[in-house]
Image (cartoon, rainbow, N blue to C red):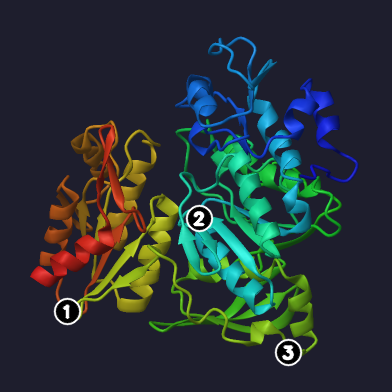
Amino acid sequence: MNHHLGDLRLDALCDRLGLDASALTGCTDLAARADEVTLGACFLAVRGARFDGHDFIAMAVARGARVVIHDTARPIPSPAPGVTFLPVADTRPLEAALAATFFDHPSAALRMTGITGTNGKTTSSILIAALERALGHRTAVVNTLGVHVDGRREAFERALPPPAQLQRFLRDRREDGHGGVVLECSSWSLHLDRAAGVSFDRALVTRLTRDHLDVHPDLQAYARAKWRLVEQLAGSGKPRRHLSLAASFPAPGPVPHDVECLRFGLTSDGADVWARDLVTSPAGTSFEVICRGRSAGRLRTNLPGAHNVENLLGVVALYPDLLEARIRGEETVLDRDLFGGIHVDGRLEPIPHPGGVHVYVDYAHTPDALEAVLRALRSLHGDRVVAVLGCGGDRDREKRPMMGAIASRLAREVVLTSDNPRGEDPASILSQIAAGCDPGLARVHREPDRREAIRLALSRVTPGDVLLVAGKGHETEQELAGHSVPFDDRQVLREEISRC
């Protein structure tokens, strides 16, 4: 195996980290999870938030680990024949650099796109993949919905896996002939350095709104975590680095001077790329793209709502050469109907109703996302909206009354129910959401059982009405007091609609 990266070799990195390079050279794989260890692998024992890899060293050895890298302070099992134990002060900060070098820094040979922001990341990743395919680039996608490779979808335990798993995945994509990979990067994954060691060519930063304030102390810290992607882009060493940045994003610093940047937004306020002459209908949305004051032609998408127009603007702002070509009147792949048949699981996903009710499931679980989705539905179908929603337990409590206020302002009736209550009392969560509801604007129901809440909402709609079930989208399980149970809003709706 060649572990060379430019002038950085595995032996040089090991020397820097104080590791025995000769012990690692013959290893067949690198894993930070004991259940991923194969014969001849190196196991990196890392302390995580929930589990400590040191507790699984014996399992890794039993599965065939040849080398174990561990914290000096942690005791290890009795020495095993043929197994080398390499102690270091702390394994956590080593994983990204070691994984990138061990797997021969695969992102250097791939066209890497990172996406971060509060809302729109998953949809944007699907839109980028559609555009990349039209350009003839074989592109894999890692997002909240799973891992998308050549039309197949699999699941990672996390939307963005830890460095060893991620770098192995990138190595596999390089070796099977992919040209690029799109990575959805949450603020928490960036904070944990899961994408460290990835050399990005491009980054898309969508708008920042309230979310994850249970893990970030404030919005400024949340923005700084997102901005790490931009800093990583600047230091990637790729020959051309481009940033598509939401004009409203509160950047904690200037855009690095060696990064090209186009800012985007629905209006020209602070934006280089914006939309004009929006035309919306149940069939979708079309609009004219304006780039620095010049027309770059029209785009159409079947995805409804102004928020999806903004998502699409952010995507095309990643392609300045295509925009410039359209401005010059040249034909490009953007002239094809690339975005007219986009499907994103759990994002304004329609569910058929034989009685003429417009039923949708959406992942909206933040105040901004809920408002955007409700406004999109009202613009399509009118104001006769019934909304089913909840808020996750053991997460940001301050957003709960905000969600209630938005729902009661934009829906005719609101059914409050459990989302993923986790370790909290569901009734307490509903009370906190209800505290923001205005009963003078909407009738508010409380039903902690999510299936019963959906059944109640279906009993309240008539032909022409809109029913939105928000919060869980594509999810297929519900987290309840330390365990998970199967629950898919889409499937439950189909079952309950069939009984109506």
- Helix, strand or loop at label 1? It is loop
Determine whether, in the image, residue 13 is placed left or right of residue 227: right
Q: Which residue is mark 1?
A: 463
Q: Position of residue 474 (x, y in %)?
A: 37, 58
> Dividing the picture into quarters, in which one does residue 9 lie?
top right
Amino acid type for the residue under numbered disc 3:
Glu
Quadrant containing the N terminus is: top right
Mark 1, Cα crowd under 10 Å, few <14 / some 14-19 / many 20+, is few
Q: Residue at x 35, y 54 (%)?
A: 475
Q: Residue at x 59, y 29 (%)?
A: 65
Q: Which residue is mark 2?
A: 119
| Residue occupying the far right of the picture | 7
Answer yes or no: is residue 380 visible: yes
> Dividing the picture into quarters, in which one does residue 467 lie?
bottom left
Q: Is residue 401 shown above or below 271?
A: above
Q: Of the two numbered discs 3 and 2 on the same chain, state the one appearing first in sequence.
A: 2
Real-space Cα separation, disc 3 to disc 1, in angstroms: 44 Å
Foreground tag (3 vs 1): 3
Q: Is residue 383 shown above or below 140?
A: below
- Helix, strand or loop at label 3? It is loop
Q: Position of residue 414 (x, y in %)?
A: 22, 56
Q: Position of residue 344 (x, y in %)?
A: 44, 67
- Helix, strand or loop at label 2? It is loop
Amino acid type for the residue under numbered disc 2:
Asn
Q: Which residue is mark 3?
A: 331
Mark 2, Cα crowd under 10 Å, few <14 / some 14-19 / many 20+, is many
Answer yes or no: is residue 245 visible: no
Q: Looking at this view, is 409 or 326 the one in front? A: 326
Real-space Cα separation, disc 2 to disc 1, in angstroms: 31 Å
